[in-house]
Amino acid sequence: MSSAPDQPSVDLLLPQELVDKARQVIEANRAVGRRLAVAESCTGGLVGAALTEIPGSSDVFEASLVTYSNDAKMKLVGVSLDVLETFGSVSIANAWAMAQGALDRAGVDVAVAITGIAGPDGGSEKKPVGTVVFARAERDAPPDKIKAERREFGNLGRGGIRLQAALCALELLMPDAPMAAPPAP
């Protein structure tokens, strides 16, 4: 179906920096033969959307599991009720379980999980708005080698927090990516 002459063509729906990072992720993982999945909570599918902006990404990117509610975290990626009740949805334990669940359920080589508080509400003194937790699990790595990290982006606004979280998640999908300092807002 072609667009009407008076309607402009839209090539990208997302910020250029997000698409550029997604392109790097797809190309680098294609070069080493790795398949990817993500389990997303506060980003609501933004990482998956960025990866699918890249033509041909389906030979690298397998799945984006949007697990926004706790019920979805339990059903889709197998997070236990005990983990959620004991540590909360924005925790290292939950991100760890989400990453391992995405890895197992999608049957990929590497999975990254993102969970956090994008705001404007929902923060607390211990977990303020802008708190995001990431985890990366890799196939055939022992469970204790799953990497997880909590980052504080500050109150950049809901869109700003989600963008920074997505950029960090994409960085973690790069081959041999360390858990490192967040990109500058």
Image (spheres, grey):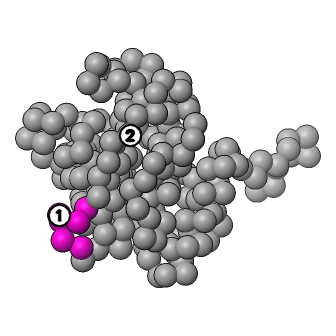
The image quadrant where one finds the N terminus is bottom right
Magenta highlight range: 141-146
Pointer 2 residue = 151
Q: Residue at x 36, y 68 (%)?
A: 110
Q: Residue at x 85, y 44 (%)?
A: 8
Which residue is at the front of the view, 76 or 162? 162
Tell me the amino acid under the disc marked 1.
Asp
Residue 10 coordinates in the image, percent (x, y): 77, 48
Q: Answer whether residue 47 is magenta in the image.
A: no
Q: Residue at x 48, y 66 (%)?
A: 174
Neighbour tally class for label 1: few under 14, some 14-19, many 20 plus, Cα within 10 Å = few
Is residue 21 shown above or below 183? below
The image quadrant where one finds the C terminus is top right
Is residue 69 shown above or below 52? above
Which residue is at the front of the view, 74 or 23? 23
Is residue 124 shown above or below 39? above
Residue 53 visible from this viewpoint: no
Q: Residue at x 57, y 53 (%)?
A: 50
Tell me the amino acid under the disc marked 2.
Arg
User: Which quarter of the figure has residue 144?
Assistant: bottom left
Looking at this view, name the residue that lies furthest to the right.
5
| Horizontal side, residue 29 vs residue 129: left or right | right
Neighbour tally class for label 2: few under 14, some 14-19, many 20 plus, Cα within 10 Å = some
| Horizontal side, residue 149 vs residue 24: left or right | left
Give the Cα separation between the discs numbered 1 and 2. Answer: 20 Å
Q: Helix, strand, or loop for circle 1?
A: helix
Residue 93 coordinates in the image, percent (x, y): 19, 46
Which residue is at the front of the view, 153 or 100? 153
Pointer 1 residue = 144
User: Which quarter of the figure has residue 112?
Assistant: bottom left
Residue 34 coordinates in the image, percent (x, y): 44, 76
